[in-house]
Amino acid sequence: MGLVQREIEKAGIPTIGVSIVREYTEKVQPPRTVYVKWPFGHPLGEPGNVKQQRAVILEAFRVLYSAATPGEIVDLPFRWRRYDYDSYEEPGEFVPGH
Amino acid sequence: MFSRIRNQLIAKVITRFPSLAQRFITAYQPWQSGEPTPWTPVTKPLKECRVALVTTSGVHHKDQQPFNMQDAEGDPSYREIDGAKISNGYLITHDYYDHSDAEKDLNIIFPIDRLRELQNEGIIGSLADRHYSFMGHIDGQHIATLVGKFARQVIEKLRQDAVDVVLLTPA
């Protein structure tokens, strides 16, 4: 996945990727990544868990704007089946320079 | 055919027992270009951006040709996904992960409904009509085809659709 991400970014379109295998992401070096230590086949979480899926996407967009170094990987604090998504605070705004 | 069943079985086992997955992760070495990491700054607020999804989860419409799972070096082609229709029925052709949960809820690999909600709330400017699905695990000679041919085609379509930001999801 990181390979395709690199090509899109190289073509001038900013990208953000979700990773479930940190080792591969470290090697392939896509521009910006959020990492979740979750099982294969579940990059956005569990079926039907809307709050969880939304939290991963919003964190991905947050990192799209906050990442300053090419290859940055941000580890998300969402432990598999041990995170209360009601306590998740959504970012206020997604704007350049933050 | 036997190797497909074997791959599917391994995928189910390592999804259920993540500690075993580490052996497969260590054994597989992704291709590295050796080139500097590309970088395009985001210049617009998200509420003005058009967003598209690119996934390597192997999802596709039912009437599209499935990915070729017989080739050990993978299938470097992609399927164009109609964001308005994909939630109504889809197939996942991918033997290297257990997609039984993704068959219950597409959004855990391809979060199209969540993005539409963010569009409706004005958090993202708009959602592109077209999205793109690859199968990942591309190796050997197919890497050049992926980069030189299929990724290039997708980039051209993203440009035609004036996409500002791409969110990528694996499986």
Image (cartoon, rainbow, N blue to C red):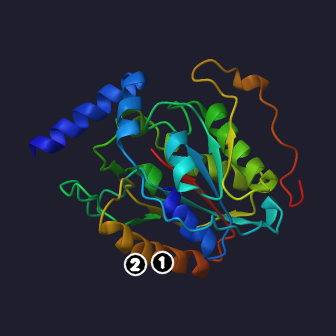
Residue flagged by tag 1: what amino acid is it? Arg
Q: Relative to the observer, which residue lies in front, B20 or B90?
A: B20
On screen, residue A50 above or below B164: above
Q: Is residue B112 above or below residue B64?
A: above
How crowded pointer 1 is (Cα within 10 Å; few <14, some 14-19, many 20+) is rated as some
Residue at 41% from the left image edge and 33% from the top image edge: B101
Q: Which residue is mark 1?
A: B152
Task: Tell whether B11 sits left or right of B82.
Answer: left
Task: Tell me the residue that label 2 is attached to.
Answer: B149
In the drawing, does residue B68 fall left or right of residue B170?
left
Is the residue under label 1 in contact with that under label 2 (CB below 8 Å)? yes
Image label count: 2
Q: Position of residue B20 (x, y in %)?
A: 36, 25
Q: Are marks 2 and 1 on the same chain?
A: yes
Q: Secondary structure at mark 2?
A: helix
Q: Residue at x 83, y 54 (%)?
A: A94
Where does the image place residue B26, in percent across and percent down from the top left?
40, 37
Which residue is at the front of the view, A42 or B147? Answer: B147
Picture residue at 65% right of the left edge, 59% below the top: A31
